[in-house]
Image (cartoon, rainbow, N blue to C red):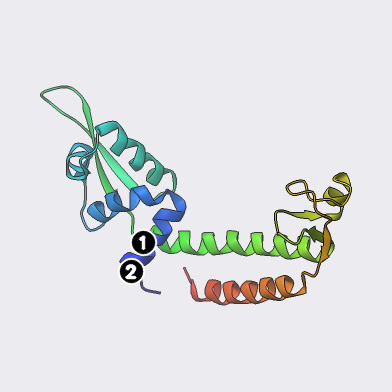
Amino acid sequence: MRVTDKIIEDVVSEIAGKDIVPLVLKLKDKKNISEFALAHKMKLEINEARNMLYKLYDSNLVSFVKKKDKQKGWYVYYWTFNKKHIRYLISNLKKQRLNKLYTWLEREKNNNFFSCSHNCIRLDFEQATDFVIKCPECGELLNHEDNETKIKDLKEHIEKTKQELSKCVI
């Protein structure tokens, strides 16, 4: 699998947030860029840029080299984007998504759900009985919900995610 800009943007926005994507695009094809230069290019305060870089560092998407400024005596951090780590993160995110889908599927299979005709809220049996089978939003009687199509859709989504995961060979 080729790591494109679109894949990088998707992974970064899921891991660290959409607001950090422009920073990564400035950083991705360069090496050892000063945090001050990055902040200036992004028109950010240095603390904002550092916070974004630390979020990326927590996921090993960036690495840094620390050097002491001889004139001021401060440490300056120089950052590099770790493009190779994107493949690992893609695989990891798909595994997490697959686990959530399995959990959701089990919940759908093992519970009866109820909702009103306005679809205000969806409750399992225990929750519905807590509200005396009435919608807590509109007060209408709750009806049993057929979730067979939802179960079928979840199974299809699980299969699709498994296929995508098999293509993500690290």
Specify whether 144 is left or right of 22.
Answer: right
Specify whether 32 is left or right of 90.
Answer: left
Report the front residue among 122 and 56: 122
Under mark 2, the amino acid is Thr
Q: Residue at x 71, y 59 (%)?
A: 118
x, y percent for residue 112: 84, 61
Which secondary structure lies at badge 1? helix
Res 69 quadrant in image: top left
Which secondary structure lies at badge 2? loop
Specify whether 144 is left or right of 36.
Answer: right
Question: How many circles with numbers are drawn on the protein?
Answer: 2
Dot 2 alpha-carbon crowd within 10 angstroms: few under 14, some 14 to 19, many 20 or more: few
User: Which disc, if any, is residue 4?
Assistant: 2
x, y percent for residue 141: 84, 55
> Eyeballing the image, is 141 above or below 45?
below
Q: Residue at x 80, y 53 (%)?
A: 140
Marks 1 and 2 sit apart, C-alpha to C-alpha, by 6 Å
Q: Give the position of the N terminus as an image quadrant.
A: bottom left
Res 146 quadrant in image: bottom right
x, y percent for residue 147: 77, 69
Q: Identify the residue position indicated by label 1 in the image.
A: 8
Query: Are the residues tagged 1 and 2 within 8 Å (C-beta)?
Result: yes
Residue furthest to the left in view is 71
Q: Residue at x 79, y 49 (%)?
A: 139
